[in-house]
Amino acid sequence: MSVEVVTFGCRLNTVESEAVRRAADAARLDDTVVINSCAVTAEAVRQAKQRIRRLKRERPGARIVVTGCAAQAEPAQFAAMPEVERVLGNEEKFDRAAWAGGERIAVADIMAAKAMQPHRIGAIEGRTRAFVQVQNGCDHRCTFCIIPFGRGNSRSLPADDVVAQVRRLVENGYREVVLTGVDITSYASGEMRLGALVKRILREVPELARLRLSSIDSVEVDRDLLDALAEELRLMPHLHLSLQAGDDLILKRMKRRHSRAQAIAFCDQVRRLRPDVVFGADIIAGFPTESEDMFGRSLDLVDECGLTQLHVFPFSPRPGTPAARMPQLDRAVVKERARRLRQKAETAVRAHLEREVGNRRCVLTESRALGRTEQFTPVRLSAPVAPGTLLDLDIAGHDGRQLIAA
């Protein structure tokens, strides 16, 4: 391909990379590598720069263009790299005219973005489940997070466009669609919130076998979404929660909007509505001022919420955020707490796998050897199957990381 896109960061970047590739291809660029960067941590920025330098060594004649959240938030630092030809902002990366332009930095004020345009992606290369971006940006200002300055304020895709995209993907053979965004539970199209959108998709695209949600903020979940979880079996029983911590004072210093008790109550409520639900969560280890007792409450939250899959983030100060100016913990303490959280996560995953043995699950195959259940648990297949196939399989065992089909 004349344009190669290297993607860092979240699932949303994965979706957007397809639209970026189309915009860059339309500009008829030759031998171009696009870095779709992530700004969530300083480490993510470092990795992007490292990849840029390596790419230039390996392909000295290639044109390197940097876009994404890190490029939007800090364009000058990428423009200063001799390996980089151009820097495009998060709005400009979808604009064919911007790709055809010649200015070294094309980054507009992201806070001025008021609307969201559909990407109309019919397929995502190498993926058996499709992603539809329904929302972008964030109106909240968590003290550890730089993302609003890379994405702008919250804006949502009109419901008609969402339904049309889902229908197009199903017509192209996808059995499962994932709704994604920066803060999808803030979705608002007129009076329509996320729960009503979910109901409309399932009602108007009856051929869709499975609908899944990406990470959600439990404090924003509306009644319609709870009803859909209880009543719509095609809405998958897997929720990934943006929890971040289990101690109320740390949550307050993070400027989160939920309490520990609210998080536990939400999980209990959803489990009553949908007993087969599985919860994942993001948790930060070693946030500034976190004591051992405060950290212990994050460890305990895994059991009290019944969490199964954890994304553990050792805290690292992100320049430009309030948390970077707070009293920091020793890096060795941060790493040790992250290790203990990951160890707790391994125990939780193993317990979940044990409970699954003997059950019969509907599995969507991702490759000829691997699939995932409704709860997003990986399953090793007993015989090769074409990717994108739905199978009812008996679970015979597990290996500590994934289930094994009979």
Image (cartoon, grey):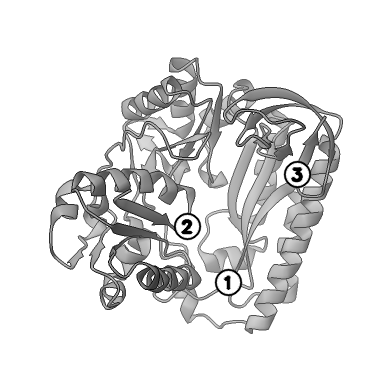
Cβ atoms at labels 1 and 2 below 8 Å apart: no
Give the crowd class for mark 3: few <14, some 14-19, many >=20 residues within 10 Å: some
Location of residue 120 (image quadrant): top left
Q: What residue type is labelled 3?
A: Gln
Q: Which amino acid does label 2 sit on?
A: Gly
Q: Residue at x 61, y 41 (%)?
A: 239
Residue under pointer 3 = 402
Residue 277's place in the image compared with 7, above or below, is above
Does dot 2 land on a helix, a strand or a loop?
A: loop
Q: Can residue 182 be seen in this view?
A: no
Give the crowd class for mark 1: few <14, some 14-19, many >=20 residues within 10 Å: many
Q: What residue type is labelled 1?
A: Phe
Quarter of the image that includes the C terminus: top right
Residue 57 location, x and y as percent?
38, 73
Q: First in sequence: mark 1 or mark 2?
A: 2
Q: First in sequence: mark 3 or mark 2?
A: 2
Residue under pointer 1 = 315
Alpha-carbon span between mark 1 and mark 3: 28 Å
Residue 264 location, x and y as percent?
70, 48
Residue under pointer 2 = 9
Front-most of residues 5 and 397:
5
Q: First in sequence: mark 1 or mark 3?
A: 1
Residue 135 location, x and y as percent?
38, 42
Does dot 1 land on a helix, a strand or a loop?
A: loop
Give the crowd class for mark 2: few <14, some 14-19, many >=20 residues within 10 Å: some
Task: Determine whether, in the image, residue 78 is placed left or right of residue 401.
Answer: left
Front-most of residues 131 and 235:
131
Task: Determine whether, in the image, residue 392 is placed left or right of residue 49.
Answer: right
